[in-house]
Amino acid sequence: MLKKSHKSFKTMRAKKSASKRVNPEPGVHVARLIQIIDWGSQIDKYSGDEGRAKVEFVWELPQSLHVFNEDKGEQPLLVSRKYGNTLGRGSAMKKDIESMLGHKIESDFELDSMIGELCMLNLSIEQDGEFENVVIQSLMPLTKDMAKKKFPEFNDQFVFDLDNFNQDIFDSLPEWKREQIAKSPEYANVAASQPVKKTVQQTPVKSNGQAKVKEQPKASPFKKGAVKGKK
């Protein structure tokens, strides 16, 4: 386990990057998993034409605060990471969940149970041209002393699952995320099977004239029917 100094746990003030984004200081941060977002099948350099099912984890850093809006006062910075939507062999998501919890999990583990989970993230800042990117170097469970402490909760906590579509949760996502999710064939299937409020411009997914959904594992990481947001 990474050694941690007491200084790492003091409330940190964020810095603005060259792109005007606000980044946390490099080092170890207490983090709470507040959102698990199903992005559907997305095309990237590893996916091929049909895309690859993706899931995003979003953590808030309750000790790294910044005033984005004077009316709201100090708010925690957010850190996120996308994964392939699988808990099979070689799964990066499974590896990170096990690192957060400090123990192994089974392939039928339900992602919904992770919402609200506290852990520690070891973060670095990497330069990419004029931009600075936050990189999660490692994840760890809280130490015994830290686990005894209470950390304030700032943001709504929820799971967004395209198999159990929730319009209110979808509408609460940033516009750029909604637009990207709407490009997935899974979202197209939701829109075709039930009335979906059009909050973004959907990009048709073409595959021989039809939207084609990549076959999912039999044991979905999402717990069916458990998409209700909580705080």
Image (cartoon, grey):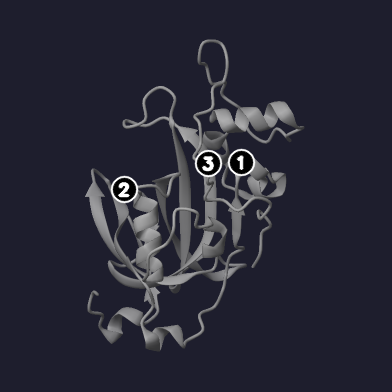
N-terminal of the two: label 3 or label 1?
A: 1
Tell me: residue 49, above or below residue 3.
Answer: above
N-terminal of the two: label 2 or label 3?
A: 2
Q: Nearer the viewer, residue 48 or 25?
A: 48
Nearer the observer, disc 3 or disc 1? Answer: 3
Residue for badge 1: 162
Count residues near mark 3 (Cα–Cα under 10 Å), then give few for <14, some for 14-19, many for 20+.
Answer: few
Q: Residue at x 56, y 11 (%)?
A: 209
Quadrant for residue 186, please give it. top right
Q: Which amino acid type is marked by label 1?
A: Leu
Q: Residue at x 58, y 39 (%)?
A: 178
Quadrant for residue 189, please give it. top right
Count residues near mark 1 (Cα–Cα under 10 Å), then give few for <14, some for 14-19, many for 20+.
Answer: some
Helix, strand or loop at mark 2: loop
Q: Nearer the viewer, residue 190 or 11?
A: 190
Quadrant for residue 84, please give it. top left
Tell me: residue 184, above or below residue 164.
Answer: above
Number of numbered tags placed on the structure image = 3
Where is residue 88? Give x, y as percent: 39, 47
Where is the N terminus found, in terms of image quarters?
bottom left
CA distance for labels 3 and 1: 16 Å
CA distance for labels 2 and 3: 17 Å
Where is residue 59? Give x, y as percent: 46, 62
Residue for badge 3: 218
Q: Nearer the viewer, residue 219 or 74?
A: 219
Residue for badge 2: 90
Nearer the observer, disc 1 or disc 2? Answer: 2
Tell me: residue 165, above or below residue 201.
Answer: below
Where is residue 185? Give x, y as percent: 56, 28
Q: Which amino acid type is marked by label 2?
A: Gly
Helix, strand or loop at mark 1: helix
